[in-house]
Image (cartoon, grey):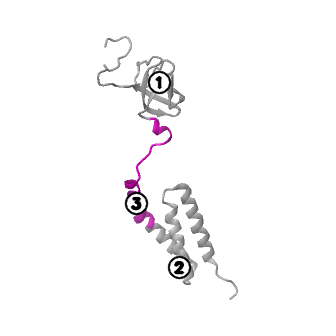
Amino acid sequence: MDQIEIHWVWWVVAAVALGVLEVLTLDLVLLMFAAGAVAALVASLVGANITVQVLVFAGVSTFMLVVLRPFLLRNLRRSTPLVETNTAAHVGRTALTLTEVTDRSGLVKLAGEQWSARSSQTGVVHPVDVTVRVVRIDGATAVVGPVQDPDEDPPHAPGTSP
């Protein structure tokens, strides 16, 4: 035998590398490819040629992506609550106006930080030291609206009667 077949080493390296990358990404895609690499490793160890190994890798990976991944994601989402992070976590929070907030500019204190802000409604001005609610985040700007109390009248545009 002139050349020793060591394809199995490459499948081990691929499976380990994909498994490590899956730990970093946590989206269950690379894990499916790692399972395909393990299946190809088994095919290599039983003596299959490289073409069969690649076909086994492709087939098992595809099966895992199409059938097993949706099932795992569904069960993972059912058992783990969704926790909003980054800017999405600020939507719905209250903020304190540091300057007058108009539909073009302003500053608010949100979660202990100073944010640029603007009003969600054209013509509505929020004065200084008023509590407002974050409606959405556009880039690095908090779009804010009034905090509605059940016994409070809705805000009105300046120059109109309440």
- Classed neighbour count for the residue bearing mark 1: other residues with Cα under 10 Å, few (<14), some (14–19), many (≥20): many
Q: Which residue is mark 2?
A: 43
Percent of width and height locating residue 151: 29, 21
Residue 94 in magenta? no
Q: Are marks 1 and 3 in contact (CB under 8 Å)?
A: no
Question: Which sits in the foreground, 34 or 77?
Answer: 77
**Mark 3 secondary-structure assignment:** helix
Vertical placement of 71 versus 42: above or below?
A: above
Question: Which sits in the foreground, 11 or 108?
Answer: 108
Q: Residue at x 52, y 61 (%)?
A: 30
In three-dimensional space, the C-alpha distance between marks 3 and 2, rounded to whole angstroms, equals: 26 Å
Q: Residue at x 38, y 58 (%)?
A: 75
Q: Where does the magenta region start and end?
A: 64-90
| Residue 85 image label | none
**Mark 1 secondary-structure assignment:** strand
Q: Which residue is mark 3?
A: 70
Percent of width and height locating residue 39: 51, 74
Q: Which circle, 1 or 3, is nearer the viewer?
A: 1
**Residue 120 left/right relative to 10:** left
Disc 2 marks a residue whose amino acid type is Ala
